[in-house]
Image (spheres, grey):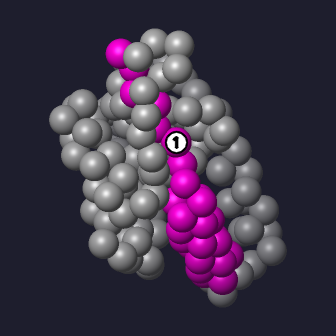
Amino acid sequence: MDSVEAMRLEEQLKRFIRWNRSAHPPIEGLSRTAISVLAAIVRAGSRASRPGELARELGMTTSNIASALRELDAGGYVTRGRDANDGRRVNVMLTDKGRTAMAHRRAKRSTHLQHAIEATLDDREQGELVAAGNLLERISNFPAS
């Protein structure tokens, strides 16, 4: 792949991400930043998240994370509390409301994507898309420079 093709692929991926985001407005009352933080907390699973870890994962400043966590806490999507083993640390836990909101959002987005794929791609192209997704996943594991 030459540099022109790489730039074209990057633009195509950006366009796809914009399309996917625009298909569903943010969760009522939450900023996109707060939704990104909430999604990272969901990805963490059952373990508690820490603000510093979230900042590193999302490439955000700690002040942006703190602002988003205040927004999420005020909305009842997360709770924050001191770590039992180290009182200097803050743990962020997902609430049932946060878990439900993200599950609902993810289901809507997945259904929309599935319908768009079925409406625009034939069976062969759908298989190619699955293969391309697997390749993109492999590429995303390449160390960042």
Magenta segment, which residues?
88-117
Between residue 118 and residue 22, name the one nearer to us: 22
- Asked whether, in this view, residue 58 is left or right of residue 68, the answer is right
Mark 1: secondary structure: strand
- Asked whether, in this view, residue 50 is left or right of residue 95, the answer is left
x and y percent of residue 74 in the render?
32, 58
- Residue visible at 46% across and 12% down in the picture: 86
Query: Mark 1 packing: few (<14 Cα in 10 Å), some, or many (20+)?
Result: many
- Asked whether, in this view, residue 64 is left or right of residue 52, the answer is left
x and y percent of residue 55 in the render?
34, 31
- Residue visible at 43% across and 60% down in the picture: 76
Q: Check disc 1 and report the residue beneath it.
A: 93
Work out which residue is located at the far bottom of the displayed protein and give it. Answer: 119
* In the rendered image, the vertical position of residue 33 relative to residue 47, given as above or below: below
Between residue 120 and residue 34, name the one nearer to us: 34
Q: Main structural element of the magenta stretch: helix, strand or loop?
A: helix
Between residue 110 and residue 54, name the one nearer to us: 54
* In the rendered image, the vertical position of residue 17 relative to residue 91, given as above or below: below
Q: Is residue 104 magenta?
A: yes
